[in-house]
Image (spheres, rainbow, N blue to C red):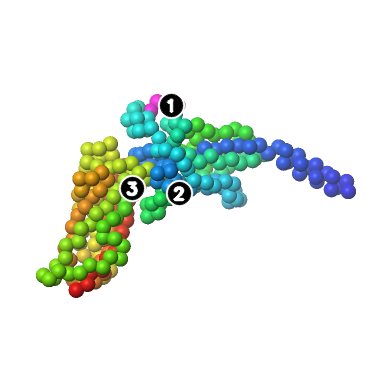
Amino acid sequence: MRSLIVWTLLLFSTTALATETRLVVRARARDGKFIGTTMGGVRVVLKDAQSGQVLASGVTAGSTGNTQTLMKQPQARGAPLADEASAKFTATVDITEPLLVTVEASGPLAQRQALVTSTTQVWLLPGKHIEGDGLILELPGFVVDVQTPSAHEFLKLGADKKLTVPVRTNVTLMCGCPTEPKGLWDSSRYELEATVKFNGKPLTQFPMKFAGKTSTYEGTLTVQQPGAYEVTVTAYDPATGNVGVDATTFIVES
């Protein structure tokens, strides 16, 4: 009986010492803004770095943040980057002692073809909240979304045994920030290309040009043989290292 009482007191003491500790996590696109609700958010997972136990998980929600603050004005040391509306996920854990945690951020969830994961680690101290800007993880890349031709579309050769296939794609940053020549995110420096395979073998490559609509780019492909075609569109920014990829397939019938 005495042993049981001692263990009960020890368990109660340990539980009583556990302190609620909050960690704000944000994801920011490289060369861009926060990734929030308009892009489906970013999945955040908080794990005990030693045991791998999941301590908290959720999705960032909120706005992409203030363009002036994030992209235009010089950033002074200590000045906040986020405002109250900026996308975030707040993890809450109860801990009794310093704990090293692994933080994973995966997104954007609304564009799965562009999804990447960024991981870091941070120490948490009981009751010492990390709020405000919190922990900001960077997600590099572009969201490339091929719109035409649609997936597995069937097309027919013309009477002259030729077919011109328009290729059209949307390209944004991971935050959904728009791209266009001479814009805030200047696509004139990007390398946008389409690579084509025919029946699994390399066929041709051609550049994608601005289509006159924000974030939209196009090119044309002329084919002369029936079969299966795969089109892979890539975007690359040599200034930031951002890269994005998407692909589609279509079938040509005689």
**Does label 1 or label 3 sit earlier along the sequence?**
1
Q: Which residue is mark 2?
A: 106
CA gap, disc 3 to disc 2?
14 Å
* Magenta span main SS: loop
**Does label 2 or label 1 sit earlier along the sequence?**
1
Residue sitting at x 20%, y 45%: 212
- Residue 198 screen position, x and y as percent: 24, 68
Q: Is residue 136 above or below residue 108?
A: above
Residue 198 seen anywhere in this rendered image of the structure: no
Q: Badge 1: few (under 14), some or many (20 or more) residues near its Cα, within 10 Å?
A: few
- The residue positioned farthest toward the right in the image shown: 1
Q: Amino acid at mark 1?
A: Ala
Q: Which residue is mark 3?
A: 142
CA gap, disc 2 to disc 1?
26 Å
Q: Are marks 3 and 2 in contact (CB under 8 Å)?
A: no
Looking at the rendering, the stretch of residues picked out in magenta corresponds to 75-79
Q: Secondary structure at mark 3?
A: strand
- Confirm whether the magenta stretch covers residue 76: yes
- Residue 62 screen position, x and y as percent: 45, 39
The numbered disc on residue 79 is: 1
